[in-house]
Amino acid sequence: MNKPLIVLEIANNHQGDIDHGKRIIREFGEVCNSYTDTFEFAVKFQYRDIQTFIHKDYLNSDLKYVRRFLDTQLKEEEWQELLNYAKEFKFKLICTPFDEISVEKVVNDKFDILKIASASFDDWPLVEKIAKTDMEIIASVGGASIEKIKRFYTFMKNREKMFALNYCVSLYPTKYEDLNLAYITYLKKLFPDISIGFSTHEGNENPFTGALAYALGAEIFEKHIALEDKNKNYGINDYSCLPSDLDSWLNELSASLKIVGSVENRDVVLQEELLALRDLKRGVFAKKDIEKNKILDVEDFYFSIP
């Protein structure tokens, strides 16, 4: 990417409701329109083959994630409608497959990037399947030790894959004192040849997290998005943001890009600095007339401004 990539994670916040999913894309797309000169934008979805992903003995259970995934399923034609709608708003498309069948679906549906979730980071049968595709990959490292991260990095490098790593804290929501954004710089130093991103799960009280992550070296930013609908009893969780939250967050991140700048831009500013400093630099002045060919010593001149 020529610009930082902002990934808007819809996950199951579409509620299995195609109209609600479109509304999310539309309202967040309107926010993103103000920042397209600064960022690339993508929306991210999640694919699961429910019949195999959930054990058959638990398909009728009330377990939190089982019910959530079952209750928010979309039909194939609804998925295509939602993906096409996102393209209308110039979003790139990213998808997280949670099983091997879903990897094939991600490829067939022609997503731009494939995302590996933190929970699947060391799911080696799934990672092996993903590595056999020709897709670019972003992987979140939430909950992974540095040994696991190095193993994943080596695995992908040996297969000459194009991939990036997202620093992530898999606590929902994440307390600010648990973010430890310094780890982004640590990963940048360990893996200087790949992009490092930041996948966020904190609340919306502080809009500066993206800006700080960029200052520490992040180039990819993933943020969960959602909309309320009281008539349909759709709420939002503590780690998803509303359009107004995203606008504030992007505004601070955009300012961070200007403030951090680049090495090349410093050379441009340097010429202006020299002119600004000229009147503060001391000049060399003769104390008296100096004859031609005289060998100068410190008694012959002095320093003063301007």
Image: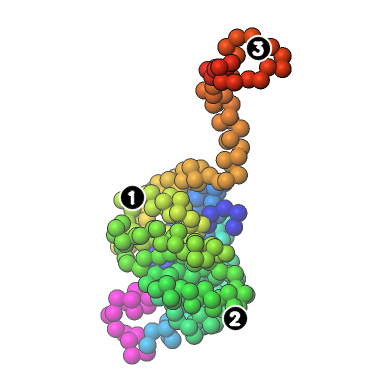
Outermost residue on the bottom side: it is 57
Q: Check the picture and name the quadrant holding the N terminus.
A: bottom right
Of labels 3 and 1, earlier in sequence is: 1
Q: Position of residue 46 (x, y in %)?
A: 46, 71
The answer to whether one can see residue 84 in this image is no
Q: Is residue 4 above or below residue 171?
A: above
Asked if residue 183 shows in the view, the reply is yes
Where are the magenta residues, as a range?
56-72
* Figure coloring: rainbow
Q: Residue at x 44, y 76 (%)?
A: 148
Q: Amino acid at mark 3?
A: Ile
Query: Which numbered mark, 3 or 1, is in the foreground of this view?
Result: 3
State which tag comes first along the sequence, 1 or 2.
2
Q: CA distance from mark 1 to mark 2?
A: 40 Å
| Majority secondary structure in the magenta region | helix
Indicate the secondary structure of the residue bearing disc 1: loop
Residue identifier under label 2: 132
What is the number of the mark on residue 290? 3
Quick one: 46 or 134, which is closer to the camera? 134
